[in-house]
Image: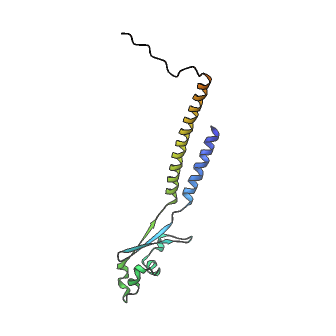
């Protein structure tokens, strides 16, 4: 039993370290006019400060083509919106997978216990085959 607790603590420690060490990928949502696209911010120094109007315009996106080629680029800031977002957090993925694996483990444990009980009852029945598993009721008297 003590060994099980040590393994459980080790598993939870590894899970916690993975959740804190892994960072969620950052995306810059560039919206030009009414169309938008997501661009992943890559690199070791990726941060939300990179997601600016200039960043969106420097990507040469087809949806921003009319903004970039306009002769007066003064309206570009009014037509281009940038938003930094995080998607698919590693922590969220670990929590979901932990829940799924935990639930599956508990269901497997319950099934194994049930099979073990049925197997043990089968051995008892094989040892005493003449015994009935119930007591007959007395006949009703009128």
What residue occupies the far bottom of the structure in this picture? 71
Q: Is residue 11 above or below residue 139?
A: below
- The residue drawn where x is 49% and y is 56% is 92
Q: Is residue 71 above or below residue 8?
A: below
- Could you say where residue 100 lies in the image, as x and y percent from the top left? 51, 50
Figure quadrant of residue 6: top right
Query: Which residue sits furthest top?
Result: 142
Residue drawn at x 57%, y 28% is 121
Residue farthest right in this picture: 3
How many numbered markers are drawn? 0
Identify the residue at horizontal 55%, vertical 42% (top origin): 108
Residue at screen point 55% across, 44% down: 105
Q: Looking at the image, which is closer to me, 102 or 59?
A: 102
Residue 70: x %, y % from top left: 37, 87
How far across and down, in percent of the image, does residue 33 sit?
35, 77
Who is closer to the viewer here, 46 or 69?
A: 69
| Apparent side of residue 47 relative to residue 8 in the rendered image (left or right) | left
Occupied quadrant, residue 79:
bottom left
Type of colouring: rainbow
Quadrant in the rendering for residue 109: top right
Which quarter of the rendering shows the N terminus? top right
Could you tell me which quadrant the C terminus lies in? top left
Q: Return the x and y of residue 122 as percentages of the image width and height.
A: 58, 29
Q: Is residue 57 above or below residue 125?
A: below
């Amino acid at each position: 039993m003590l060994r099980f607790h040590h393994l459980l603590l080790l598993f939870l420690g590894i899970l916690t370290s993975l959740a804190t060490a892994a960072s969620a990928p950052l995306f810059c949502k560039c919206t030009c006019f009414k169309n938008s696209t997501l661009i992943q911010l890559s690199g070791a120094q990726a941060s939300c400060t990179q997601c600016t109007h200039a960043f969106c315009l420097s990507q040469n996106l087809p949806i921003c083509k009319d903004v970039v080629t306009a002769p007066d680029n003064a309206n570009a800031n009014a037509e281009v919106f940038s938003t930094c977002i995080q998607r698919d957090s590693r922590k969220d993925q670990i929590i979901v997978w932990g829940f799924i694996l935990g639930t599956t483990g508990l269901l497997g444990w319950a099934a194994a216990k049930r099979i073990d009980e049925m197997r043990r009852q089968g051995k008892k029945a094989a040892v005493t085959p003449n015994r009935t598993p119930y007591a007959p009721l007395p006949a009703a008297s009128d």
